[in-house]
Image (spheres, rainbow, N blue to C red):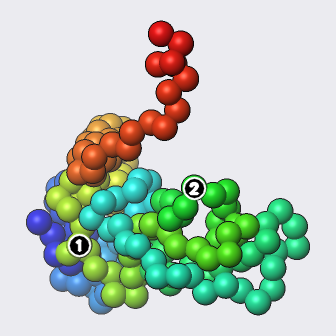
């Protein structure tokens, strides 16, 4: 499994039949420059695409903002700096994520969230299926700029399949919640 962003980028280049780069941070080849300009957007899109169990984290009590929202909710809370996507609050309450803040009427807020520190880019935390989904989407995104546009339709199909597979494998790593509503059972 890939343990660096450069290794993931090289797997995408390999899918296109191209030579690898030496480093995502410093490679001056055309592929290196295109990957450097594409990496973060593609990575972030894939990270926001699902509730990746390999990246889930539980927050401590979120810091409440001094200014309340102007309407709709009573409180605003700062999200953790590594929060990519809020999955749920610790209590069953209405909330909204707006402008990097969690808005709710709850006096205290804890969240389950997809965590990824973009500054350190810890791709070693990604499971194998998530890496494959990221590699496939990266290949799709860089192919036109690297004169491999004819491969895009087939690469898009592969990318969709790998993303779907990654979502399935991530989802089956938890026991499903039991439905609390029994209205349909009660009518029997």
The residue lying at 67 percent from left, 57 percent from top is 94
Residue 128 placement (x, y as % from top left): 17, 59
Q: Is mark 2 on a helix, strand or loop?
A: loop
Residue 170 placement (x, y as % from top left): 27, 51
Question: Going by the image, does 80 lie left or right of 173?
Answer: right
Figure check: 96 above or below 62: above
The residue lying at 41 percent from left, 73 percent from top is 58
The residue lying at 48 percent from left, 38 percent from top is 180
Residue at the limit of the structure toward the right, as seen here: 70
Asked whether 168 or 137 is in front, the reply is 168
Q: Quadrant of residue 7?
A: bottom left
Q: Is there CB contact under 8 Å for labels 2 and 1?
A: no
| Viewer can see residue 148 | no
Q: Which mark is residue 113?
A: none
Asked whether 7 or 65 is in front, the reply is 65
Q: What element carries label 1?
A: helix
In which quadrant will I find the N terminus? bottom left
Residue 49 placement (x, y as % from top left): 44, 54
For marks 2 and 1, the one nearer the N-term is 2
Q: Which mark is residue 125?
A: 1
Query: Marks 2 and 1, how far apart in space?
Result: 29 Å
Where is mark 2, residue-wise? 92
| Viewer can see residue 72 | yes
The residue lying at 18 percent from left, 82 percent from top is 22
Residue 53 placement (x, y as % from top left): 30, 60
Q: Which of marks 2 and 1 is in front?
A: 2
Asked whether 47 or 39 is in front, the reply is 47
Residue at the limit of the structure toward the top, as seen here: 188
């Amino acid at each position: 499994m890939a343990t660096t962003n450069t290794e993931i980028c090289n797997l995408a280049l390999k899918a296109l039949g191209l030579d690898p780069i030496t480093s995502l941070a410093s490679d001056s080849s055309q592929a290196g420059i295109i990957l450097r300009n594409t990496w973060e957007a593609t990575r972030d899109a894939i990270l926001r695409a699902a509730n990746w169990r390999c990246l889930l984290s539980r927050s401590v009590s979120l810091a409440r903002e001094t200014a309340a929202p102007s309407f709709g909710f009573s409180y605003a809370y700062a999200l953790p700096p590594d929060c990519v996507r809020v999955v749920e609050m610790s209590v069953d309450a209405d909330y909204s994520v707006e402008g990097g803040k969690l808005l709710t009427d709850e006096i205290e807020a804890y969240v389950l969230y997809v965590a990824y520190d973009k500054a350190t880019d810890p791709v070693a935390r990604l499971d194998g299926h998530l890496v494959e989904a990221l590699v496939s989407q990266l290949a799709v995104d860089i192919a036109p700029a690297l004169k491999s546009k004819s491969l895009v339709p087939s690469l898009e199909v592969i990318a969709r399949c790998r993303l779907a597979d990654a979502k399935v494998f991530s989802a089956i790593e938890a026991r499903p919640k039991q439905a609390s509503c029994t209205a349909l059972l009660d009518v029997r």
